[in-house]
Amino acid sequence: MLPLLASLHLGVLRPRDALAIYARPDLEFPRLEQRGVLLRVAHGYYALIPESARGSAWRPEMESLALGLGQADYGNKAVALMHLSAARIHGAIPRALAVAVLAVPKQRPPLETVCGRIIFVKRDVGKLKRMRMETELASGWSTNLEQTVLDLARRPDLVVGLSRVTREAACALFPRCDEEKLKVIVQGQRMASALARLETWVEDA
């Protein structure tokens, strides 16, 4: 049964995702958790533990968990890591955060997981400037460098208590941005005020 479970190609699973494999996945998933195959990451969600990590105290990184969980609910094409999570992907935040930010197609309250909080932001992911990326639980999308920097500046207080980290990450990434790509996003997404704030931050740094 385990190869069949892996064949679903979902790093994060809900019991209903396995209805074609188990008659009662709601009963089978807790058993698989006891066997060290699944990790219950939130109410109704389980992460498929990588085979090499079974038998250990493995926990997924927040960015990986958020991406996998979002894909379980909305599919691969409709979600993307953004804001502080994308800044981590781009190397601006070296330490792990107990929070992840994910763009999704619907308004949704934050979700507490065993690894931290996932903050969902309603966005049309197809209109965001993105890049492909790989995590231990899922392959999918993250906003690209320029989109990430502008998103940080647009909503510096999105993650409570991390506004300073947000500002520092934006300032660290800004010199790596392509000016023409920034202009395209500013014009297409009406982010002139975000760019102005960003430029002020860099001048004051």
Image (tube, rainbow, N blue to C red):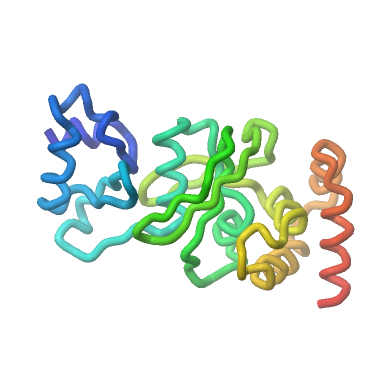
Above or below for 1 versus 83: above
Quadrant of the rendering where the C terminus is positioned: bottom right
Residue, x 72% and y 68% (percent of image)? 167
In the displayed orientation, state which residue is furthest to the bottom.
205
Question: How many numbered marks are there?
Answer: 0
Q: Quadrant of residue 124?
A: top right
Q: Front-most of 48 and 17?
A: 17
Residue, x 55% and y 46% (percent of image)? 120
Q: Front-most of 6 and 151?
A: 151
Task: Where is residue 201? Give x, y as percent.
Answer: 83, 69
Instruction: Say whether residue 154 is left or right of residue 23.
Output: right
Q: Quadrant of residue 176?
A: bottom right
Q: Front-most of 12 and 52?
A: 12
In the displayed orientation, state which residue is furthest to the front.
109
Residue, x 13% and y 38% (percent of image)? 28
Above or below for 44 versus 17: below
Task: Where is residue 103? Give x, y as percent.
Answer: 58, 42
Q: Front-most of 45 and 53?
A: 45
Residue, x 66% and y 57% (percent of image)? 158
Instruction: Say whether residue 189 is left or right of residue 96.
Output: right
Above or below for 118 versus 3: below
